[in-house]
Amino acid sequence: MALTEHFHDAEDIHPIDLVEHIAEHHDWEFDRIADDQIAMAVEGQWRTYSITLAWSAYDQTLRLICTFEMEPPEDRVPALYEALNRVNDMCWAGAFTYWSEQSLMVYRYGLVLAGDQIASPEQIDTMISAAVLSAERYYPAFQLVTWAERTPAEALQVAIAEAYGTA
């Protein structure tokens, strides 16, 4: 069943209601934290990612944050930041950052819906999928930089060389 089949008049649907429907559709574990925020767990190949989406009516933005734990040794933090800069140069939508106080790697993306635009369920589903795919793609590189003491350039070869899809 297509994601839009449940929504005939999406203009009256709150963006977080759409996200909740998508989480149910994919059978993801989720918690509606508030009217304008939802948190969910999405299973990936490497780990389970914590994803939070929040709607800000003030700036008309649907904000996605995808996190996973990372506790690099202190002496590897500069190399991790260099890897983050290189990764962000390759990301077209969204960006990674490292929150050292929380020991979290974070992928962030904001979908601006100014002018009372409406996000479709497919658009939101793609946004979530893109976050998980980016985290999955670069997770091995971050691990190689922090734990295998590879240079960022060497570690990113793993992410770049990885074959997606089959012929």
Image (spheres, grey):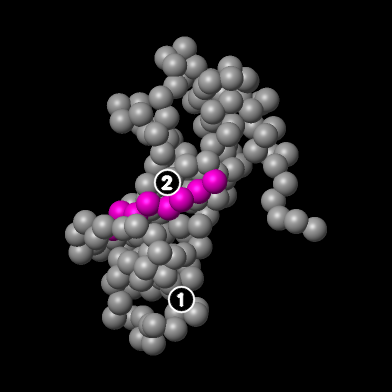
Q: Which numbered circle lies on residue 3?
A: 1
Q: Position of residue 117 (x, y in %)?
A: 38, 72
Above/below status of 77 relative to 20: above
Please tell me whether residue 39 belongs to the stretch shown in magenta: yes
Picture residue at 64% right of the left edge, 28% below the top: 155
Residue 135 visible, this angle: yes
Extreme residue in the top direction: 75
The amino acid at mark 2 is Tyr
Extreme residue in the left direction: 34
Picture residue at 55% right of the left edge, 50% below the top: 133
Dot placed on the residue nearer the N-terminal end, 1 or 2: 1
Q: Which numbered circle lies on residue 49?
A: 2
Q: Is residue 36 left or right of residue 8?
A: left
Residue 53 visible, this angle: no
Q: In which quarter of the image is residue 56?
A: bottom left
Q: Position of residue 72 (x, y in %)?
A: 44, 22
Question: Magenta region: which residues?
Answer: 38-45
User: Who is closer to the viewer here, 79 or 51?
Assistant: 51
The amino acid at mark 1 is Leu
Q: In which quarter of the image is residue 116?
A: bottom left
Above/below status of 158 relative to 32: above
Main SS class of the magenta portion in the image: strand
Q: In which quarter of the image is residue 158?
A: top right
